[in-house]
Amino acid sequence: MKGQEKKRSTWSWVFEFAGIRRKDYIASVVLAVCKVLCIVAPYLVMAQVVSELFAGVKDLSLYGRQFALIAALWMAAAVFHALSTSASHKATFYVLGAMRKRACDKLARMPLGDVTGRSSGGLKNVLVERIDSIETTLAHVIPEFTSNLLAPILIFACMLALDWRLALVSLATLPLGLVCMAGMFKDYDVNNQRAVDATKALNDTAVEYIHGIEVIKVFGKTQSSYAKFVDAAKAAAETYVSWMSRCNVYFSLAMSVMPATLLAVLPVGAFFVSNGSLAPETFIMCIVLSLGLITPVITILSYSDDLAALDVVMGEVTSIIDAPEQVRPAQTQATVADNTVTLEDVRFGYKDEEVLHGISFTAREGETTALVGPSGSGKSTVARLIDGLWDVQGGTVRLGGADIRDISSEDYNRRVSFVSQNSYLFNDTVRENIRMGRPGATDQDVENIARAAGCHEFICSLENGYDTVVGSGGERLSGGERQRISIARAMLKDAPVVILDEATAYTDPENEAVIEQSVARLVQGKTLIVIAHRLSTIQGAQHIVVIDGGHVAEEGTHDQLLAENGLYARMWEAHTSVKGHLTEGGDAA
């Protein structure tokens, strides 16, 4: 099925996204047809006027009524055009909204690894700028393509009725123009992909530059970092300029040759008139009609680039929509006996590189299980697999004996709470960021949990207390403050399984002790899984799992692991040695 979906046409996607607004696109086409009829009808009236002039009719009131009719038809055409584009715009904005919503909903169902594997600048570019870029195409192509296709057909039909020979002669410049247009689209896919890649690279560089501006300034890398951004901007500009420069020659030739219908119609028509095979009034009408024959065709051809770009953008959006997603049942299909977490021969890798090689251990309900090990050993990956942010590629993660893939997402999310070292806060008040843990919580519930988590005092010291807006990503707070609010949010959720991934990494020693005491009170009876680099913080854990190189190297309590004199013992010795040096340095100072 996936392969078939990827072969779907762009327009089938468009009409699927249009949903209930498809009728607006249909109305747009009908109104566009009415517009065309109002545009072509004046030519027929003009034909009548020319015939009457050659016949010697001198009734000025008749000509006045005919010219008034022409004016009315042109005005009606303008009205139909406005109504047509209005209907198509309504449908188009609905389509763009549906595309964004569908893509964003899909991101939430995709494994976290697949999302983080895409550049944030690239995703933002697709969901914002790239989707925006097809608005004009969708809003105008459907009605205007219809009208510009129908108009030349009707005009050509009129010319055939007047004189089939001149009708065919009027098309003489079209093949030459099409050859020139074809030159514009040589290597289109290659050039367009190069332009898309250059734009994405520029977006990624801009995002990197903005997010890293503090580090750039601190380490004096402003010039080199800005130069990288400038180079990316120049590369993007040069990609488009070189592409457009090559196309301009073909475009200019096409725009000069195709509309020049009179180059063939005038001499051939004059010859027919001179030999008596064509009436002068018919010749004049053919001249008038030929002037309106090719311009709509040029407009249709001008949409070729927009339509090709639409295909590319739709391909980028559907690459998100068609991406694999985590499959979870709507209802839990297994019995969850308790809140014990078990990993059985778990294997996982990023792309083609396996980073976990058969991890097995058990985190029992009511106990603290600590995951320790060198940096890059796979601790955080294990935590994210337990949280269900990724699916294992081998083995099983179980909760209460049930495979977590047999537990509905809603049920599992209610049972597990995760606090990472990079705590993210939304651009909202402190109160609402904490309340996200349990949306139905009262203000008093929020304040009570903040007190229990040891962050009530610092929140009250903020400018507007609990109503202080924290900024995008919590930028107005320190790293430690963000972590403490994230812990309060997790505690308010009151999930039976709590995962803390270096949750106190940015907290000072004094507040770290407060948070540890608060967490100890709040997780009583729960399954607590802690990842920590500072071994002193997990010294009292009932179960310590040492992970090294994607394997479980050791398991046991603090005292048992020290007695084994293995990796944990060496890590503890290094930890206490560094701590001792820091203490001596502090005393000396």
Image (spheres, rainbow, N blue to C red):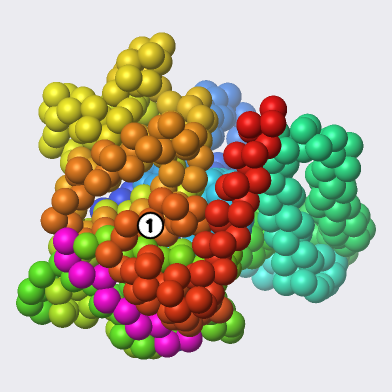
Q: Position of residue 398 (x, y in %)?
A: 23, 77
Amino acid type of the residue tagged 1 in the rendering: Gln
Quadrant (top left/top right/bottom left/bottom right) for the N terminus = bottom left
Q: Secondary structure at mark 1?
A: loop
Q: Quadrant of residue 179?
A: bottom right
Q: Which residues are magenta?
A: 357-366
**Which residue is found at the position 38% from the left and 57% from the top?**
539
Find disc 1 in the rendering and name its residue.
Answer: 539
Q: Is residue 38 above or below residue 553?
A: above
Would residue 352 appear left or right of 31 to someone viewing this image?
right
Residue drawn at (84%, 39%) of the image: 221
Residue 468 at what x, y percent from top left? Answer: 37, 19
In the displayed structure, 110 sits above or below 295; it is below
Asked if residue 429 can be seen in this view, the reply is yes
Going by the image, does 2 lie left or right of 280?
left
| Residue 252 visible (yes or no) | no
Q: Nearer the viewer, residue 479 or 435?
A: 479
Q: Is residue 428 above or below residue 101?
A: above
- Residue 528, percent from left and from top: 26, 58
- Using the image as rendered, state which of residue 497 and residue 570 is in the foreground: 570
Quadrant where the C terminus is found in the figure: top right
| Position of residue 495 in the picture relative to residue 430 (left or right) | left
Q: Inspect the magenta stretch and tell me whether residue 362 lies in it.
A: yes
Packing grade of label 1 (10 A; few <14, some 14-19, many >=20) is some
- Of 150 and 194, which appears nearest the observer? 194
Left-right relation of 40 to 400: right
Q: Main secondary structure of the magenta part?
A: strand
